[in-house]
Image (spheres, helix red, strand yellow):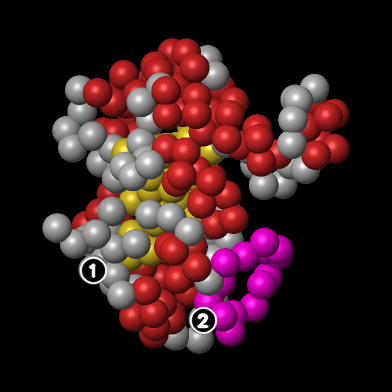
Amino acid sequence: MNDPKIIVALDVPTSRQALALARRLDPALCRIKVGKELFTSAGPKLVERLGEQGYQVFLDLKFHDIPNTVAQACKAAAQLGVWMLNVHALGGRKMMMAAREALGGTWPRPRLIAVTLLTSLGQDDLHDLGIHGKPADVVLRLAARAHDCGLDGVVCSAQEARALRERFGKGFWLVTPGIRPQEAALDDQTRVATPRTALANGADYLVIGRPITRAPDPRKALEDISREIA
Ligand code: C5P
């Protein structure tokens, strides 16, 4: 089966813009990530429309609530036919297990991954929140909880990928944002990796937004990166 490694983050505000952009890309070369802004404005219909264009969708809504609510939200996402969705590992073991169980009976079962620590949180924020340890250790601890709960993987930076791959082995998906081809602008990302470095560090899938969506020719940018990692 065709398994493109690139997930294009469709960070645009409207359904119209999203579908126009998707038409300029290629489902043989990428999947699509729909996040909170776009989903809140465009709704489930957009996920269906992207499916009709041949795309598999990563629904990036980072569920974090009581176990029952998250389980029902995951079921609803599965009914939309999404390929992958995510929850916050900080929602805890019971929440993650409820999410995993809720997807158990669905076919095809969407992949369920966890967000560990938001990369916007630094050491001072952890201290302020009463969370002990260095960010890297907290990431490892939360990823271990996700792994214990039977989740399929985690979102992580390319820098964290190597340690996570060593700890959890193959089969635990590492999905990495913060990807920039060598010549691309950093935008607001700081700790970036090239597509090849991220894959070499153990990433399974690369979330790439602006280097593709804001390129003069998004299709060409997607093709160039696909060729670079082929
Ligand atoms: O445009 P860019 O390639 O920076 O987009 C990256 C995407 O990955 C965005 O949708 C962003 O919200 C998401 N993301 C991230 N860093 C994280 C988690 C998610 O950049 N730690």
User: Mark 1: which amino acid?
Assistant: Ala
User: Which range is magenta?
Assistant: 180-193
Could you say where residue 48 lies in the image, as x and y percent from the top left?
28, 49
Q: Quadrant of the N terminus?
A: bottom left
Instruction: Give the Cα separation between the discs numbered 2 and 1.
Output: 19 Å
Could you say where residue 111 lies in the image, as x and y percent from the top left?
32, 39
Residue hosting label 1? 28
Measured along the vertical axis of the image, is residue 22 above or below residue 136? below
Which circle's residue, 2 or 1, is located before the other in the chain? 1
Q: Residue at coordinates 36% horizontally, 68% vertically from top-left?
A: 22
Q: In the rendered structure, find residue 215 and report the number of the disc placed on it.
A: 2
**Label 1 beta carbon within 8 A of ligand 1:** no
Q: Which residue occupies the foreground of this view, 201 or 210? A: 201
Q: Picture quarter containing residue 180?
A: bottom right
Residue 12 appears in view: no
Q: Residues within 10 Å of mark 2 (few under 14, many from 20)?
A: some
Could you say where residue 27 lies in the image, as x and y percent from the top left?
26, 66
Q: Which residue occupies the foreground of this view, 145 or 185? A: 145
Measured along the vertical axis of the image, is residue 111 above or below residue 47? above
202 sits left or right of 226 in the view: right
Under circle 1, the secondary element is loop
User: Mark 2: which amino acid?
Assistant: Ala
Q: Residues within 10 Å of mark 1 (few under 14, many from 20)?
A: few
Of helix, strand and loop, which mostly describes the magenta segment?
loop
Could you say where residue 120 lies in the image, as x and y percent from the top left?
72, 46
Q: Residue at coordinates 70% horizontally, 39% vertically from top-left?
A: 135
Q: Which residue occupies the foreground of this view, 51 or 93? A: 93
Q: Is residue 230 magenta?
A: no
Q: In the rendered structure, find residue 224 and report the number of the disc placed on it.
A: none
Q: Residue at coordinates 46% horizontally, 44% vertically from top-left?
A: 166
Q: Is residue 183 magenta?
A: yes
Q: Picture quarter containing residue 25?
A: bottom left
